[in-house]
């Protein structure tokens, strides 16, 4: 079938219905062109023509304003003057700098969020490259770079250590101190969009706030949450977002397929593993197990939860405990490959033992694989992060996926793959939750720590009740917002 798929693939398919530009050389980043072959079925979600044209205009703008242009040089020089931008003409090139922090799942979700905000506000996204972004991802925009030059002033000491709520140009802090208004607009602002943000930080996207923020040439943003759902609360953004994404739950799916292309080194890990272990199976199941809390590790109640969920939801067959198997094994049995990813190898080891000692009740053959079990999170270690990224892509290539609640690693994997996941509830008191999991109705990531209310007119309304398609997440107890 792979050959048939290849034959019918027109160049437009390789570019995901025009989502990707044709202005790149293939060899520099193989994943950009080969990615579609990882997905046996084409995505049921098609990018809108409007999104495609918006991306092409963005690429042109980025080329005009990117590093190595006169516009960029002028803009960085204007930072030194630190003028008041209240009455200055808005330059064509305004920027938003993404600061790297937290785990890879967090980084990928926030890169997508910041890029969408840049698209909506016609800013240029520049990416902090002091860590290992360029070992993981190819350049997404042709003829330019999204990497922030290392000598960028606001990333030098003392700024590097200074980006927190106490930073004097932190937007939420300035709002609280009434030190920003239409007659006093600074040359740069810091947006703090983390789990510990205050409401004043979280409301940056509202119309009234945007009227000021729009005039600021440089934004520095540090984020660890997928803040896309809240952008819909701004009526101006909402009009635009509806045109860009007529299928609302496809936002991350499209943005991720446009923006993220693993480097050749990572792509080699993905394709080698896929060909060696997954390609021959009739069906693939992905299981991502993230254990939060201290100590993290292997737990019997989590193992029981995995078995309970997958068997109850008929993702894995039950074991055949009869002495003599009733199953007719004369026909060729179906081969099911299970891809487990976790920091801990014991989960897949136990699953392997289960299915290897006993036949399954359906006669299916179940093979279990786990590419790595690193035990400890080692963010910013190149090879560790590369393995993590490779596993996200491998998970995204499966037919069905089970992920741990609240994990951004899981969010990226299922949304990339266009899969509605089964979410394993987070256990409390070291017991297996009952029910163990639920099927999500949307493939969008959850915004874990959203604002509690809406913008101006919706100030008193619970943020999960403002729009019918922005609702509380199924996998966390309190708050959380997700597009449906
Ligand atoms: P989250 O903490 O689950 O929201 O996900 P993040 O990706 O932000 O941070 C967890 C980090 O731990 C990952 O980026 C990896 O570095 C590591 N990690 C966690 N689970 C896995 C896994 O299943 N496979 C691999 N290779 N690394 C993992």
Image: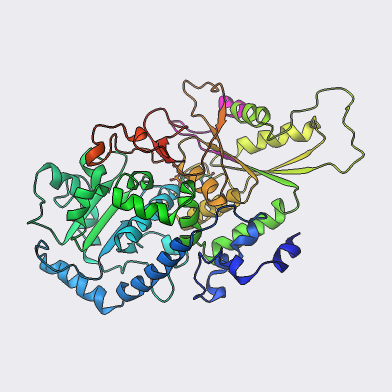
**Residue 100 in view, yes or no:** no
Of residue 103 and residue 403, the one placed in the foreground of this image is 403
Displayed quadrant of residue 434: top right
Magenta residues?
A: 287-304
- Magenta span has 38? no
Displayed quadrant of residue 146: bottom left
Of residue 444 and residue 238, the one placed in the foreground of this image is 238
Q: Position of residue 332 (x, y in %)?
A: 87, 44
Horizontally, residue 280 falls left or right of residue 212, namely right
Of residue 292 and residue 447, the one placed in the foreground of this image is 447
- Magenta span has 297? yes
Q: Position of residue 352 (x, y in %)?
A: 71, 37
- Classify 196 as above or below 308: below
Residue found at the far bottom of this picture: 70
Horizontally, residue 151 falls left or right of residue 47, namely left
Residue drawn at point x = 49 percent, y = 56 percent: 254
Residue found at the far left of this picture: 183
Residue drawn at point x = 19 percent, y = 45 percent: 172
């Amino acid at each position: 079938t792979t050959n048939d798929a290849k034959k019918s693939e027109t160049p437009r398919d390789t570019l995901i219905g025009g989502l990707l530009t044709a202005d790149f050389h293939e060899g520099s980043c193989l994943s950009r062109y080969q990615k579609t072959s990882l997905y046996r079925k084409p995505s049921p979600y098609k990018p809108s023509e409007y999104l495609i044209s918006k991306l092409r205009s963005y690429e042109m703008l980025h080329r005009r304003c990117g590093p190595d242009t006169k516009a960029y040089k002028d803009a960085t020089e204007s930072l030194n003057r630190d003028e008041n931008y209240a009455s200055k003409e808005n330059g064509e090139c305004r920027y938003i700098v993404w600061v790297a922090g937290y785990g890879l799942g967090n980084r990928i979700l926030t890169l997508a969020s910041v890029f969408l905000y840049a698209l909506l506000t016609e800013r240029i996204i520049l990416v902090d490259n002091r860590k290992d972004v360029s070992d993981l991802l190819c350049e997404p925009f042709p003829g330019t770079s999204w990497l922030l030059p290392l000598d960028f002033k606001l990333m030098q000491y003392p700024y590097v250590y200074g980006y927190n709520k106490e930073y004097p140009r932190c937007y939420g802090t300035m709002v609280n101190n009434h030190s920003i208004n239409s007659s006093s607009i600074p040359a740069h602002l810091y947006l703090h969009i983390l789990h510990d943000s205050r409401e004043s930080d979280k409301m940056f996207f509202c119309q009234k706030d945007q009227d000021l923020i729009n005039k600021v040439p440089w934004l520095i943003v540090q984020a660890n949450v997928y803040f896309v759902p809240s952008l819909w609360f701004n009526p101006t953004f909402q009009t635009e977002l509806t045109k860009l994404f007529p299928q609302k739950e496809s936002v991350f799916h499209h943005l991720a397929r446009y923006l993220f292309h693993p480097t050749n080194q990572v792509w080699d890990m993905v394709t080698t593993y896929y060909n060696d272990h997954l390609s021959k199976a009739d069906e693939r199941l992905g299981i991502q197990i993230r254990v939060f809390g201290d100590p993290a590790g292997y737990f019997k109640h989590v193992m029981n939860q995995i078995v309970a969920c997958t068997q109850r939801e008929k993702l894995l067959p039950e074991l055949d405990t009869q002495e003599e198997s009733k199953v007719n094994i004369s026909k060729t049995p179906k081969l099911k490959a299970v891809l487990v990813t976790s920091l801990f190898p014991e989960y897949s080891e136990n699953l392997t033992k289960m299915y290897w000692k006993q036949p399954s009740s359906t006669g299916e053959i179940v093979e279990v694989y786990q590419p790595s079990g690193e035990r400890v999170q080692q963010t910013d270690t190149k090879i560790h992060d590369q393995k993590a990224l490779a596993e996200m892509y491998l998970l995204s290539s499966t037919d069905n996926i089970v992920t741990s609640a609240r994990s951004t690693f899981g969010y990226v994997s299922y949304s990339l793959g266009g899969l509605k996941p089964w979410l394993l509830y987070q256990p409390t008191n070291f017991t297996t939750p009952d029910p163990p999991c639920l099927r999500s109705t949307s493939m969008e990531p959850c915004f874990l720590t959203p604002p509690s209310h809406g913008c101006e007119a919706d100030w008193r309304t619970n943020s999960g009740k403002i729009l019918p398609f922005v609702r509380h997440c199924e996998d966390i107890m309190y708050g959380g917002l997700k597009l449906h």
